């Protein structure tokens, strides 16, 4: 039996992936499969059988590429970028992308936007919604084809925790009031970040969570979930699947609307009870994902700690937090 401590998952066996090489015949078959759901399921299983091997023991550098509820975990080597791009090119999708830059965090915008334009959904329609209290500080960044940026003013706030948590309500309203006819998917990203590699359509799904870069190889009992029963974000010992970051999440408009609305409601209940969850909206997001399982997970390649730190499992860093001096950039410490 596999080690159940890996990634805190409850799998009785884990699927370990090796580099996937699809022949052109197989590619054609997969394209064909999009016309038949039965055939698609059959083919999907064939591909899995081809590319996965069951192991009794996971070694230190193996990766888990499937959750116990059969959601894929996206790592380098688990998808064919040319194939998946060609499939999604047939649909005219738009990916709304939200980012907040209040106070001194406007300094992160240039690198964030410039690097996104190099790596983020290149060749697909992207609409960034940038929320800031200083629209005059937004740098001029040339947008690629079919990429657009809309700047929205929001009021300043005195506590970084309130800025971070307040995103849920703004996102909830944006999706409900404006995005229905504008976009198909949405990703909500931290701004103190930079792209270094491809982030593309392989990341799309109904509800998508990103595994937190510090906890992907930790046992569940060390996850920093909210442990006080008084908080709506409470997760009891022994519960939970993964520890997800709040610095990146996404999915369909309907699913992310439900997520942001639920987190906003739970945050409000906590505030009324004078309690703030240990990691703010991230604690509520983790509670949400426990009861509303994401149907796709992104590996820590999609939100790494800092470009200068490496780990054997992470072959490519696509998106990473940048080093920042919290004391200097935050309005309170
Ligand atoms: N944020 C902001 N101004 C602030 C504090 C936070 O714009 O003064 C936004 C910004 O988008 C940031 C996010 O809230 O990326 C989350 O805060 P932070 O990155 O400080 O949290 P951490 O990732 O360090 O836990
Ligand atoms: C930190 C991160 C926080 C929070 C925390 C969870 O590394 O900066 O935002 O995610 O981990 O333990
Ligand atoms: Mn951050």
Image (tube, rainbow, N blue to C red):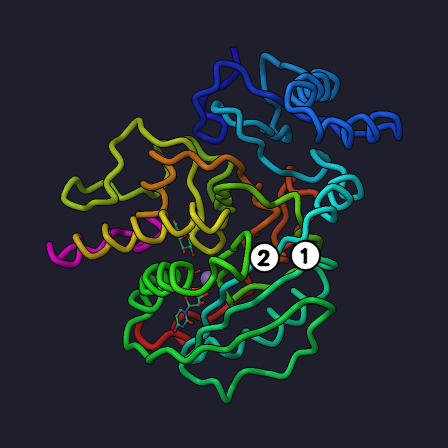
Q: Are marks 1 and 2 in contact (CB under 8 Å)?
A: yes
Residue drawn at point x = 63 percent, y = 83 percent: 140
Q: Which residue is mark 1?
A: 121
Residue extent of the magenta highlight: 270-283
Q: Nearer the viewer, residue 225 or 58?
A: 225
> Can residue 194 be seen?
yes
| Residue 107 lies within the magenta run | no
Task: Locate residue 220: give its quadrant.
Answer: top left
Residue drawn at point x = 68 percent, y = 48 percent: 91
Relative to 191, is 225 above or below? above
Q: Nearer the viewer, residue 290 or 94?
A: 94
Residue drawn at point x = 42 percent, y = 40 percent: 243
x and y percent of residue 59 in the render? 62, 24
Few, some or many C-alpha atoms within 10 Å of disc 2 (few <14, some 14-19, many ≥20)? Answer: many
Mark 2 secondary-structure assignment = strand
- Give the number of callouts: 2
> Can residue 52 be seen?
no
Residue drawn at point x = 62 percent, y = 46 percent: 301
């Amino acid at each position: 039996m596999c080690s159940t401590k890996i990634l805190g998952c409850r799998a009785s066996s884990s699927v370990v992936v090796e580099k996937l090489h699809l022949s052109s015949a197989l590619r054609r078959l997969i394209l064909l499969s999009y016309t038949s759901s039965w055939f698609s399921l059959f083919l999907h299983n064939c591909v899995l059988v081809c590319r996965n091997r069951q192991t009794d023991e996971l070694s230190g550098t193996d990766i888990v590429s499937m959750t116990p509820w059969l959601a894929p975990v996206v790592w380098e080597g688990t998808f064919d970028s040319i194939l998946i791009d060609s499939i999604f090119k047939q649909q005219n999708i738009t990916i709304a992308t939200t980012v907040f830059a209040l106070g001194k965090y406007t300094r992160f915008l240039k690198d964030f936007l410039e690097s996104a334009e190099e790596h983020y959904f290149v060749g697909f329609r992207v609409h960034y919604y940038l929320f800031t209290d200083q629209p005059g500080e937004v740098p001029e960044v040339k947008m690629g084809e079919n990429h657009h940026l809309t700047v929205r003013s929001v009021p300043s706030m005195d506590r970084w925790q309130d800025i971070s948590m307040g995103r849920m309500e703004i996102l909830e309203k944006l999706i409900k009031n404006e995005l229905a006819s504008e976009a198909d998917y949405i990703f909500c990203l931290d701004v103190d970040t930079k792209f270094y590699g491809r982030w593309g359509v392989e990341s799309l799904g109904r509800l998508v969570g990103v595994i937190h870069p510090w906890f992907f190889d930790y046992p569940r009992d060390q996850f920093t979930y909210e442990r006080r029963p008084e908080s709506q974000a409470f997760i009891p010992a022994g519960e939970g699947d993964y520890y997800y970051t709040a610095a990146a999440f996404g999915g369909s408009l309907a699913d992310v609307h439900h997520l942001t609305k639920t987190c906003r409601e739970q945050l409000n209940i906590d505030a009324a009870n004078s309690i703030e969850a240990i990691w703010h909206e991230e604690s509520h997001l983790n509670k949400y994902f426990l009861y509303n399982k994401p149907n796709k997970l992104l590996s820590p390649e999609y939100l790494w700690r800092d470009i200068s730190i490496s780990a054997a499992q992470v072959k490519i860093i696509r998106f990473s937090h940048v080093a920042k001096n919290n004391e200097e950039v935050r309005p309170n410490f």
